[in-house]
Amino acid sequence: MRSKLWILITALLLGSTMSAQIGERRKLVLEPKATLKTEPAAWTHAPMVPAPITRKEQRRVVVNWEARETKAEIAPGVIYEDYWAFEGRVPGPVLRVREGDLVEVHLTNNITSMRNHNIDFHFVTGPGGGASSLNVAPGETAVLEARALMPGFYMFHCASPDIPTHIANGMFGFVIVEPAEGLPAADREYYVVQHELYTLNGNKGKQTFSMERGDREDAQYVVFNGAVGSTMGPKALKANLGETVRLWVGNAGPNYISSFHVIGQIFSNVYREGDILSPPGHGIQTTLIPAGGSAVVEFASSVPGTFLLVDHAIFRLHKGAAASIVIDGPKNGEVFDPVTAGAKAMTMSDSDHVAAPAAHDHAAPSMEKPAAPPAAAPRKTVPKKPAKPVSLAYPITSFSAASFPEELEDLKSSVNAMSGNVVIKMLPGAGNYNPDPANSYSSPHVTVRSGSRVTFLNTDDMVHFNKDDKGEFQTPMLKSGMAFSHVFSKPGVYHYTCIPHPWMKGTITVVK
Ligand SMILES: [Cu+2]
């Protein structure tokens, strides 16, 4: 009797140990297919995300997608001729379903395609993730029904041979499978996908896929949402101060792991690898996203500004791996206070290059503010004469013509005039990587007559200094609001670049 009891206790203990090791299995009772109501599936193009699902029952959701071989501008002036896309865009759509839903996918391959295409859905339990069932020749349509069994944020991609080529050329998208109980609310949700492109070279014009570069894992471009600069400037993501921003971040690869980071933000929640069932990690600066995987990150900014989304394998910035989010709202000096407003950046200043007056927002010094160094600590070096007597730098406190120093009257002149003087503005945001010089300078390429004065005027909030390839001129460090002029006497083509920001390139052509 007693031994039987012990066997029972041991069995119970073993049983509990086993279930602990296995972990909690999620219970999902599937409603029979025949009883499910049917509705069109909710999907969007990047960077938008379909609204959260509020219904409480399983449905049959119908997706009608088309695979098409197309082309797109992947960087300024670079037309990629091998963009193969779901629903005409790279990345492909993000679909949002609920756990237990039956997803009915109709995939049509456009009649103009040159290849077969299909879809391997990572959310699908079944051979190939459905790829062989959905394999379609040009002009064909195939249908797959598959259940969303496990909540998560899943990639899908074409798995038609050669699989790497089809992924590299843009055939991917993502699926959100919401848990039956839903997700915590977020004020803003966006869909961002990183992937890299293997082109023959970085030249403008037509580009095609390079298998050799793909094999070497030597990408020419690393992009967010399909193209360099696709999610910057006027197309940046937007949110207000204090709003919870949830980014559904996919990494389509095909090769690179992403070290995803938002400069100037800390993720309050990270659902690593798209695991939205486990409690998220907190206080995370950078999260790894595997190729063919995802992460869901959240933050609520307590200060306004423009924040860059990057892959912190940071040289990829040069390949285009940047997007931005603009947080709108009033300044919050309690959290972030640029006390010296950039005055420290003038370490290379000399008496010819006077700093613009520091912008001071503060009526009274705060307790935390360190005492200002005496006389703003200008370096007491021997004032250097400008290398060329015709080159001068000026502080400009306002861009209104009335306040320009006499020598800068020419700022009013039109840009790129064949005769006379021109002004080249360093544009706001020029310090953020962008391969198109038109985003760095108001007129990156100018032609002037010999004897003309060319003025660089920094309207960006970062420091820039330019230099040409012939040793003709070098600007000092130009703070925001400062200008520098040089009179060109020798005809020639002067290629110039900003020393700290090498993508800021331009030419000054001087003719007789
Ligand atoms: Cu394909």
Image (tube, rainbow, N blue to C red):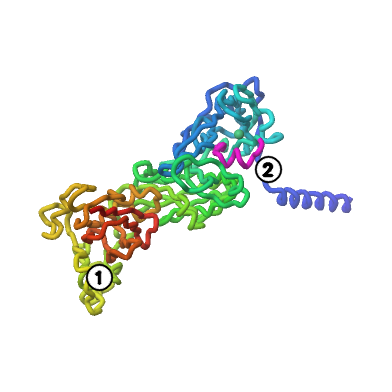
Q: Residue at x 59, y 26 (%)?
A: 107
| Amino acid type indicated by mark 2 | Arg
| Depth check, front residue: 192 or 509 | 509
Q: Earlier in the sequence, mark 1 or mark 2?
A: 2
Q: Magenta span has 173?
A: yes
Q: Secondary structure at mark 2?
A: loop
Q: Label 1 to label 2, Cα distance in Å?
A: 74 Å
Say whether residue 436 is left or right of residue 9: left
Residue 463 seen in the figure: yes
Residue beneath label 2, please?
A: 25
Residue beneath label 1, please?
A: 387
Question: For the residue with label 2, is its CB less than 8 Å from the closest atom of ligand 1?
Answer: no
- Of badges 1 and 2, the one in the foreground is 1
Q: Which region is colored magenta?
A: 161-175
Vertical placement of residue 232 versus 147, above or below: below
Which residue of the protein is positioned furthest toward the front in this rendering? 512
Residue 284 seen in the figure: no
Question: For the residue with label 1, is its CB less than 8 Å from the closest atom of ligand 1?
Answer: no
Quadrant of residue 461 within the rendered picture: bottom left
The quarter of the picture showing ligand 1 = top right
